[in-house]
Image: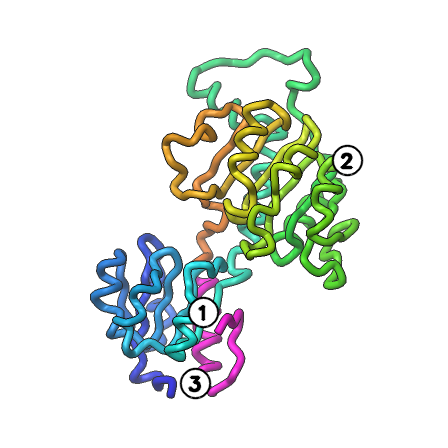
Amino acid sequence: MFPTRDSLTICFAHAAYQMKDRFDARDTGIKNFQVRTYDELVKRIGEADVVLASGMWKNEVIPHAGKLKFIQSISSGMDQYSKELLGAKGIRLASAAGVNARAVAEHAIALILAIARRLPEARDNQHKKMWRGMIGDLAQREDELGGKTLLVVGMGRIGSHLAKLAKAFDMKVVGIRRDPKAGANGADSIHGMGELVKLVPDADFVALTCALTPETTGLMSAAAFAAMKPSSVFVNVARGKVADEAALIATMKAGKIWAAGLDVTVDEPLPESSPLWTMPNVFITPHTAGETRAYEDNVIDILIENLDRLWRDEKTLRNQVL
């Protein structure tokens, strides 16, 4: 039986987000508390009927969570949660899919624009107080997006919004998704995942926006990188493991493609020993594509909707996983 409103306790578990403050601003009257570290979560999770967490969640806390009935993930990525262990305990689970789709898509187009307009280099030159002269070599000069082809791998909420933004820059958009019959979602053409290697040779930009699943793990393979044309750009705002990182590093070292814009890597934080840090044609942001000032409120909207569904004893949750 799901607890009533006046007996419910929510635990907000995140190292940085202001979840409790934004929830309290709704004046719901629901009891809640916030933890900022994993040790705090382990110590206090026994008090919670509902937990909001993302990267702090570890399945090892389940035995300590005697009252837990529902987890509202703060993130759309769900690989940290064990469906088997949660299901065995009857704990419901919902994702925050779509909560930051606009932000991630805007970040992807920002990476594309930054690389095309050579903004990272301009920032570096600013720090060196160096006024760069005009460039005669066409291949080394800033470029325009109009008329270029963007291959979007993953045409869900993020990919479809990225397609819309790209079309505003007069780009041609080619989409790839698990089920092409689900629709083009704003792309000029839509294809299956198995056609990736065939499609990348015609793309000026290849952007990963798909979820990490067994099917997409390593999808951007060594063969896919090898098929990209030398002037092309690789952008990843999905998950690091969607791309073969060793193949990416080898491709960048060999100068086989023009540049890469990465918001995600296989290991995060990116280890100091990674050669990606110092490659001049790699632009890295620290998994911040989904960051937005509206993030907390967007997640709380989903939480409140799901609480209402649970109180009504509905079987289906918004973004339901379990």
Q: Position of residue 93 (x, y in %)?
A: 45, 71
Residue drawn 68% across the image and 27% down it: 231
Judged from this view, the residue extending furthest toward the left is: 43
Q: Residues within 10 Å of mark 1 (few under 14, many from 20)?
A: some
Q: Position of residue 86 (x, y in %)?
A: 40, 72
Residue drawn 49% across the image and 50% down it: 290
Indicate which disc, 1 or 2, sits on the residue closer to the N terminus.
1
- Report the amino acid beneath label 2: Gly
Magenta residues, start to end: 296-322
Task: Pick whichever, 250 or 313, lies toward us.
Answer: 250
Closest to the camera, between mark 1 and mark 2, is 1
Label 1: which residue? 83
Residue 296 seen: no
Indicate which disc, 3 or 2, sits on the residue closer to the N terminus.
2
Q: Position of residue 45 (x, y in %)?
A: 26, 69
Q: Give the structural element (helix, strand or loop) at label 3.
A: helix
Label 3: which residue? 311
Task: Pick whichever, 25 or 217, lies toward us.
Answer: 217
Magenta residue check for 53: no
Q: Is residue 144 left or right of residue 97?
A: right
- Residue 186, compared with residue 251, is above or below; it is below
Please say if the residues under marks 3 and 1 sit with CB atoms less than 8 Å apart.
no
Mark 3 vs mark 1, CA separation in Å: 22 Å
Label 2: which residue? 147
Q: Give the structural element (helix, strand or loop) at label 1.
A: helix
Magenta residue check for 305: yes
Task: Pick whichever, 262 or 306, lies toward us.
Answer: 262
